[in-house]
Image (spheres, rainbow, N blue to C red):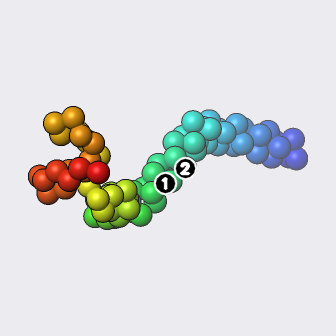
Amino acid sequence: MARFKTRIMNNIQEVSDQFKRGLKDELLDTADKKYKEAKKKKTYRKVMEVGKKAKEKLKDPKGIRGTHKGKWGYYKGGKFKSD
């Protein structure tokens, strides 16, 4: 009787091993969870706010450096001021 029980238990374990999720499925699930978490945190509005702050930080109060009629200076608001 004991042998019969162990054979049944071994067969049950073999069958259950067949239906276990593979390593590939586990990796895909974890990657999908991380992607969804990152997607929740990152929205269009937040990305645009960060970009706008970075753009303002880089702006020079004098304007854009350039030349006009052979002179170096700054363009700001469509007007040129030479050095």
Residue 52 visible from this viewpoint: no
Residue 53 screen position, x and y as percent: 35, 64
Q: Which amino acid is tagged 1? A: Lys
Q: Residues within 10 Å of mark 1 (few under 14, many from 20)?
A: few
The answer to whether residue 34 is left or right of residue 47 is right
Residue at the spot 29% in from the left edge and 51% down from the top edge: 83
Residue 76 visible from this viewpoint: yes
Vertical position of residue 72 compared to residue 59: above or below: above
Q: Residues within 10 Å of mark 2 (few under 14, many from 20)?
A: few
Residue 4 screen position, x and y as percent: 81, 42
Q: Which amino acid is tagged 2? A: Thr
SS class of the residue under badge 2? helix
SS class of the residue under badge 1? helix
Vertical position of residue 48 compared to residue 18: above or below: below
Residue beneath disc 1? 33
The answer to whether residue 52 is left or right of residue 11 is left
Residue at the spot 62% in from the left edge and 38% down from the top edge: 23
Q: Which mark is residue 10?
A: none
Q: Could you tell me how far apart the alpha carbons at marks 1 and 2 are, in whole angstroms?
A: 5 Å
Examine the image and state in which quarter residue 55 appears. bottom left
Vertical position of residue 70 compared to residue 83: above or below: above
Residue 57 screen position, x and y as percent: 38, 62
Residue at the spot 18% in from the left edge and 39% down from the top edge: 68
Front position in the image: 23 or 43: 43
Mark 1–mark 2 CB contact (< 8 Å): yes
Residue at the spot 29% in from the left edge and 59% down from the top edge: 62
Residue 32 screen position, x and y as percent: 47, 49
The answer to whether residue 54 is left or right of residue 18 is left
Residue beneath disc 2? 30
